[in-house]
Amino acid sequence: MPSTSSYYFTGGMLYFEVQGKIFRIHEDILVARSTFFKQMFSLPREGVREVEGQTEEAPIVVPGVTSQDFTSVLLFLYGREFDRCHKFSEDSLAGILRLSNKWQIPGGRAFVIPQLTAQSDIDPVVWFSLASHERVRQWFMPSFVAAAAKSFTEDDIFLIGVTWTAYFTQLREQQLNFRRLAYFTQPPTRAELDECPSECHKKWPLIWRYFHVAWFYADGFLGYKELLDMLEEVNAVNHGICETCFEAVEEDLQNNSMLRMESELLLDSARKAMAMVVFDDDIDDDDD
């Protein structure tokens, strides 16, 4: 008697309803690819559950899932057998990741993460939402830093939720308070300024003040190199101190912690935020 192949399906078809749309799917595909559905369909079916999903009139209703995400994960489960070169959109990949976590589809997570990692144009808030909600460790720090630099829209707030919105709001308040304090710091002094024949010592306090105004109103979290570039631009635009004096001031600022505190605040907040999330590999380690 011939042996059966991996494509020998014994189950029937099941009907699902997602956002008012009906889907007719092979039970075997779901059982083979999803631990959640494998366990679900192994339970005894009695009463209403006995007929649920067997006809179009009595489908299995799937709450809390969009038809777009459901379609995407089905294309992943079915389509990859026929077209491994299919190009999934960013939204489709996000949907596959969400439902792979929800329904324990191991291959989905492994399939999506490298592809989304390679996409440099993904929206920072969408990226952070996936990193935090879907527990992707390697995305968390870079997506947090990118999201912190963005002004949130109502859609962004809805996407990341109240808790993370409050966290970012508090971080930005800390940043603003720090910039207020930095605004009143005195400019560093160097002998070159006083000795310069161009009287750079007279120009320097005003350049320093213009720099802090530009810094105060700048978007995002600025690091040491970005702030030095800003200072250089402010000095050039306002015909400030000479090149020799600027190089002397720049040398002095290398030891100035003030220019590094904003980026350090961001990274410290990102590390604390990361400690709030239980990632999938944390769960795996605990199981071991």
Image (spheres, rainbow, N blue to C red):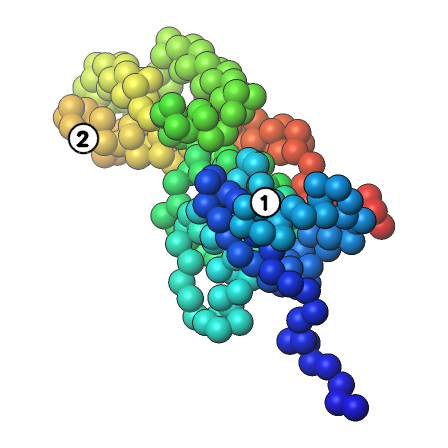
Q: Quadrant of the N terminus?
A: bottom right
Q: Residue at x 19, y 24 (%)?
A: 240
For residue 173, above or below residue 274: above
For residue 262, above or below residue 89: above
Q: Position of residue 5 (x, y in %)?
A: 69, 80
For residue 141, above or below residue 211: below
Q: Is residue 223 visible?
A: yes
How many residues crowd mark 1 within 10 Å: few (<14), some (14–19), many (20+)? some
Q: Residue at x 73, y 81 (%)?
A: 4
Task: Locate residue 141: give its quadrant.
Answer: top right
What residue occupies the far bottom of the structure in this picture?
1
| Towards the viewer: 110 or 193 | 110
Q: Is residue 17 left or right of residue 254?
A: right
Q: Is residue 201 left or right of residue 140?
A: left
The amino acid type of the residue labelled 1 equals Ala
Query: Residue 236's mark?
Result: 2
Q: Position of residue 113 (x, y in %)?
A: 54, 54
Q: Residue at x 58, y 41 (%)?
A: 61
Give the residue at mark 1: 58
Query: Count the marks: how many?
Result: 2
Task: Locate residue 123: give its quadrant.
Answer: top left
Q: Is residue 93 visible?
A: no
Q: Decide which of tag 2 and tag 1 comes sooner along the chain.
A: 1
Q: Residue at x 72, y 48 (%)?
A: 50
Q: Is residue 26 left or right of residue 128?
A: right
Gap between marks 2 and 1 measured at Cα: 73 Å
| Towards the viewer: 221 or 49 | 49
Q: Position of residue 174 (x, y in %)?
A: 49, 15
Q: Mark 2 or 1, which is nearer the eye?
A: 1
The amino acid type of the residue labelled 2 equals Ala
